[in-house]
Amino acid sequence: MLHKLLLPVAAVALISACSSAPPTVQTGDDAEVIGENLHRVDNTRADMAYIDPNADFSKYRKVMLRPLGVDNVEIVQPDRSTSVNTRRDWELTDSDKQTLQQIYHDAMVKQLGDKGDFEIVDTADDDVLEIAAMITGLAPSAAKDDNRSRPVGRSYVITEGAGAIAVAVAFGDSETGEVLALVKDSRTSNDHWGLNNSVSNRADVQRVFTSWAMQINTSLGKITGQAD
């Protein structure tokens, strides 16, 4: 039988509710469980969330950030019927990957370390929570802003934001490697029409990563007792 258990206050903050119903973790014989300890959570803002209902997040005072994973990204090509014609498929180059990793790292350090109450460290310890995120999908709104992708002579492109991005984020114990929570989420960068170029796209990505980093910082501050 599938039971639903209200998540403890410590865990509720990590997986924010999307409605008036509180997040609930599935338990019982019919519960959806992955990795033996991660139970599916219902009523969450994220697209999908799992958590270890027995995890004690209160002991973590430091955070270790793994580089953003960018090697297994599914790219949904821009719709040629509504987007500017493109001369080649949208590709994620090594330079693009490095830029995304840097934007993510800067956003997390600023929100968790500079503005938050967590020390960012490089080594594992019993009070260190490891955060490992990876981009799983990209859906650009238009062809890449370079001479090889956009038609020659096209001076500007207008789109409704840069596109959409999907990520998976794992929270684990840095010493044991045990995953304590897993969240998969997607965001649309911007819902306003405007110029689509390398500058505007970078700004949209920064806003998305900053938003995620702020949510993670706020949530971890609550579940670890670091928040005021």
Image (cartoon, rainbow, N blue to C red):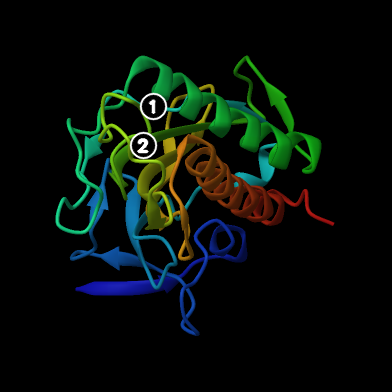
**Mark number, residue 93:** none
Which residue is nearer to you in this view: 123 or 191? 191
Q: Earlier in the sequence, mark 2 or mark 1?
A: 1
Residue at figure coordinates x 27%, y 24% from the top left:
148
Q: Choose top left, top right, bottom left or bottom right for residue 150.
A: top left
Would residue 66 be seen by someone viewing this image from the given angle?
no
Q: Secondary structure at mark 2?
A: strand
Quarter of the C terminus within the rendering: bottom right
x, y percent for residue 111: 71, 42
Q: CA distance from mark 2 to mark 1?
A: 6 Å
| Disc 1 target residue | 69
**Mark number, residue 135:** 2
Residue at figure coordinates x 21%, y 59% from the top left:
82
x, y percent for residue 27: 31, 65
In-image side of 184 versus 217 (left or right):
left
Decide: few, some or many residues near mark 1? Use Cα within 10 Å; few <14, some 14-19, many ≥20.
Answer: some
Q: Are marks 2 and 1 in contact (CB under 8 Å)?
A: yes
